[in-house]
Amino acid sequence: MDEAEDVFREYIQSKGLKFTPERKAILNYVFENHGHFEVEELLFEMRKNKVRVSKATIYRTVALLVKCGLLREVIFGEKHTHYEHVYGHEHHEHLVCSGCGKIIEFSDERIEKFQDEICVKNMFKPESHRFQITGYCEECVGGKSK
Amino acid sequence: MDEAEDVFREYIQSKGLKFTPERKAILNYVFENHGHFEVEELLFEMRKNKVRVSKATIYRTVALLVKCGLLREVIFGEKHTHYEHVYGHEHHEHLVCSGCGKIIEFSDERIEKFQDEICVKNMFKPESHRFQITGYCEECVGGKSK
DNA sequence: TAAAAATTTAAAATAATTTTTATTTGTTGA
DNA sequence: TCAACAAATAAAAATTATTTTAAATTTTTA
């Protein structure tokens, strides 16, 4: 958590921006209270604790956190963006249950090798990848609501 | 193309829906003129040829085409949904260039094996997957505009 | 052909996100 | 210290993609 703050602070400063109380508060909430989250949730969580920041500031700050590599966007098929921690978590992929919305994380070193192999073949310089499997989790198999 | 129409017609009828001229026209444009496309493009293309259908109808029809397995949604990191043909194309994954937006398709049988292995391990019933690599294509490496 | 059902259009509504505008805060230097 | 400049904020308005609504039209069926 403190180290995440260092990374953010450093990024902020390198861009000639300011490490404002709002940015600090958002960073704290992002890294103390959530795994995957959405902007709306974060806002709600902060409001609940009487920490008042505007929605626009959250959107702008989260964008900064993505840019400096602390967060990444994850798209689960809903209309709004989900975010997850990059800092302090090893890279992983997702299983998304269409029944109950549950997210199961998994990782496998073979995926990176794969990526490299494919990129070499296509003369492509990879920056990131996303592997996502959609289907039904154990509990939802059988009573498939969709 | 004709076969795609058969699939659609069959689906439509199996659901007790109607194979209207609008639906037929949209199907034709989807399968004659496009690889990847967006609703807005499709609308534009049809208007250009004086084929008049409302945007709402396109959205509704495209959703039907997804449901019956002729199309699938692909998310490239933009705010609007992209669609691609499933019918007549084998399954593939995407390399998305952040520089110029180019999409390179690739496929590899190992990915399906992988999926199955991971799903068994997690007691998950897969329905679909998506593997996408973001980065820079040959031409864009060097002059990285982002 | 009349009545019911489904579909269409166009406009309004919605949802997520971005932009604008006026205000606030922080900093700088005379 | 205080004007003046830059950056950041809140709140509201704007935007974009998509969905819904309501009214009109088409199709099907009895």
Image: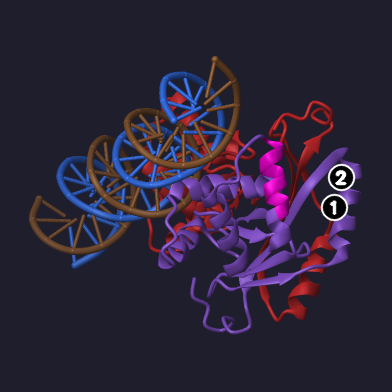
Chain colours: A purple, B red, C brown, D blue
Position of residue A42 in the picture relative to residue A70 (left or right): left
The chain identifier of the residue carrying mark 1 reads A
Mark 1 residue crowding within 10 angstroms, few (<14) / some (14–19) / many (20+): some
Q: Is residue A33 visible?
A: yes
The quadrant holding residue B78 is: top right
Label 2 – label 1 distance at C-alpha = 6 Å
Judge from the rendering whether residue B120 lies leftward or rightward of residue B80; answer left or right.
right
Q: Are marks 2 and 1 on the same chain?
A: yes
- Quarter of the figure with the C terminus of chain B: top right
- The residue nearer to you, when weighing B76 against A23, is A23
Q: Which mark is residue B136?
A: none
As helix, strand or loop, the secondary structure at mark 2 comes to helix
Q: Are marks 2 and 1 in contact (CB under 8 Å)?
A: yes
- Residue A53 is left or right of residue A90, and the answer is left
Residue C24 horizontal/vertical position (percent): 39, 40
Residue B114 percent coordinates (x, y):
82, 67
Q: Nearer the viewer, residue A76 or B116?
A: A76
Q: Please, is residue B7 above or below residue B1 in the view?
A: below
| Above or below, B99 relative to A96 | above
| Image mark for residue A119 | 2
Q: Chain of mark 2?
A: A
Query: Residue under circle 1?
Result: A115
Q: Amino acid at mark 2?
A: Cys
Residue shown at 62% from the left, 37% from the top: A17
Of residues B45 and A99, which is closer to you in this image?
A99
B29 is higher (above) or lower (below) than B112: above
Q: What stretch of residues is rendered in magenta?
A: A6-15
Residue at x 68%, y 36% (from the top left corner):
A15
- Name the residue: 42% across, 64% down: B15
Q: Label 1 is placed on what type of residue?
A: Gln
